[in-house]
Amino acid sequence: MTSLWGGRFEKDMDDIVKKFNASIAFDKRMYNNDIDGSIAHVTMLGQQGIVTKEEADKIIEGLEIIRKRISNGEIQFTVEDEDIHMGIESRLIAQIGDTGKKLHTARSRNDQCQVDLRLYVKDEIKEILHRLYYLESVILEKAEKYADKITIGFTHIQHAQPITIGFIFMAYFQMFRRDIERVLDCYERMNLCPLGACALAGTTLPTNRHTTAGLLDFAGPTENAMDSVSDRDYSIEFLSAASISMMHLSRWAEEFVWWNSSEFSYIAIDDSFCTGSSIMPQKKNPDMAELLRGKVGRVYGDLMQMLTIMKGTPLAYNKDFQEDKESLFDAIDTWKASVQIFAKMLENTEFRMDQIEKHLSKGFLNATDIAEHFAKQGIPFREAHEIVGKMVKTCEVKECDFEDLTEVELQSIDSRVTKESLGDISIKACVDARVSFGGTAPTEVRRQIKVGQEWLDGLDIEVQ
Ligand code: ARG
C-alpha cells in the first residue's frame, strides 16, 4: 500500500476518504517545527545509541535539504501526503534512502503533531507579545500627551463625570497588561515537551526525553505520556487569552466608532486608517475599528470549537484532535493582525479638544463633586446627594447651569447651601481634585503611567 502505515491494509483509501482524512492543507504551515522536532529526536536517538551517529547525521542532513526544498517551493504537498509529518518523512526516505526509515523510531504522530503545535504556538506567542508590548508603548505615549486633557466620562452612555483622556488610556493599559500576563502564564504552562510520549504509553526503547526537551528549548518533558498526547488545555488557554484580548480591542474599537461619529467628533483618525464610500463622496469611515469589532467573533468561535471538540473525547488520542489546528491558526492570525492594526490606528488618532469642550458644559458633570464638597462641610453624603439632585432639577427647569442659580434659589433648596458654599466647581478643579489612588487627576494619571512604564520596562520581551 502507498501509505507509510499501509502494511496491514489490502486496499488504498478511497479518494474521498483521503481528502477528508488529510490535514496537510493546514498543518503544512508547521513544516519548520516538524523538522526541528525531528532533528532533536534523531539527535537524541543517536546519543542514546538507538541509531548510529552516522545514521543520525545522515537523517539531519536530509531533513535540512527537505527544509530548503519546501521553503523554495520545490516541494508541493498534496492530499496524498496526508499530513505534514508523513509528507516530510516520505520525502526524507525518497531523499536519503532506507536510513530515513529509522527516524520514526520511538515516536508516534500523536506526540509528533503535539510537539509541532506547541513549538508553533510558542513562536507565535513571542510575536504576539511583541505586538502587545508595542501597543502598550503607544498607549503610554498617548496617556502622557493627554494626561491633563479633559473629556466626558460616561456611564450608560450618559454624561457622568469629567475625566482626563490620559485616564482612559491607562484604563486600557491595564486590560492589555492583563492580556500580556495571561499569555505569559499560558506560555509557561505549555512550555513542556510531549515528544517521546509516543502513541500513548511511552516506549521500550532507551530514549531520553529530557534531551529532546532541552534541544527544543522546552523547560522539560511532559510528565505523563497519555496526558501528553491527549491534552489540548494549552490551546484552550491560548484561545481564552486571545478571546479576552480581542474583547478588549473590540470594546475600544466600539468607542472609536462613536467617538468618530458625526455627533461626537471627539477624534480624528488619520486618512490612512479610514476608508471611503463607493457612493457617498463625503464619507470617511472608521472601517478598521468596525472590522476589529467584527473579528472578535471569529476568535470566540475558535475557542468554542476547541472546547466542544474536547468535551466528549476519552483518553488518549482521537482523530477529533486533528481539528485542533485551524481554529488555533485562525485565532493566532486574527489576534496578531488585530493588535498590530489597533496600535497603528491609535498612533494615528488625535483627540479634537475643540469638539470635546463644546460638550463639557452639558450634563452636570460636576454634580458629584459638589455633593462631595458639601460632604466635606459636614453634610451627610445622602443629604448632599439629595440637595444636588434638587439643584439639577431647578437648572433643568430654568435651562441653566449650577453657576447661574441665585442665592435665593439655593437657599430654598436647603438652608445650608449658599453660592459661597459651592466652592470652585469648574470642571478643571473637579478633575484636578480627584487624586484618590487610581483616580483621574493628572497627577494620579502620571503616577499610573510611571508604574506602567516600569512594568513594561521590566518585561523580558525583546523589542524589535
Ligand atoms: N494529522 C494528525 C493530527 O494532526 C496526526 C496524528 C495522527 N495520529 C493518528 N493516530 N492518526 O492529529
Image: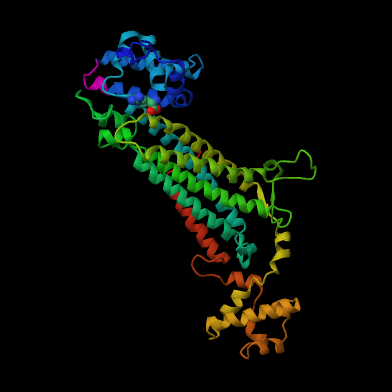
Q: Which residues are magenta?
A: 44-51
Position of 386 compared to 15: left or right? right
- Picture coordinates of residue 336, whole percent (x, y): 52, 39
Q: Is 46 within the magenta?
A: yes
Depth check: 324 or 39 in front? 324
In this picture, is 292 found above or below 420?
above
Q: Report if residue 6 is visible in the image.
A: yes
Depth check: 118 or 348 in front? 118
Residue at 46% of width from left, 19% of height from top? 16
Residue at 50% of width from left, 53% of height from top? 175
Quadrant hosting ligand 1: top left
Give the quarter of the image for residue 89: top left
Q: How is this picture coloured?
A: rainbow
- Picture coordinates of residue 37, whole percent (x, y): 35, 26
- Picture coordinates of residue 401, whole percent (x, y): 72, 76
Q: Report if residue 221 is visible in the image.
A: no
Q: Residue furthest bottom?
A: 415
Position of 411 compared to 74: left or right? right
- Picture coordinates of residue 391, whole percent (x, y): 66, 81
In this picture, is 159 found above or below 342?
below
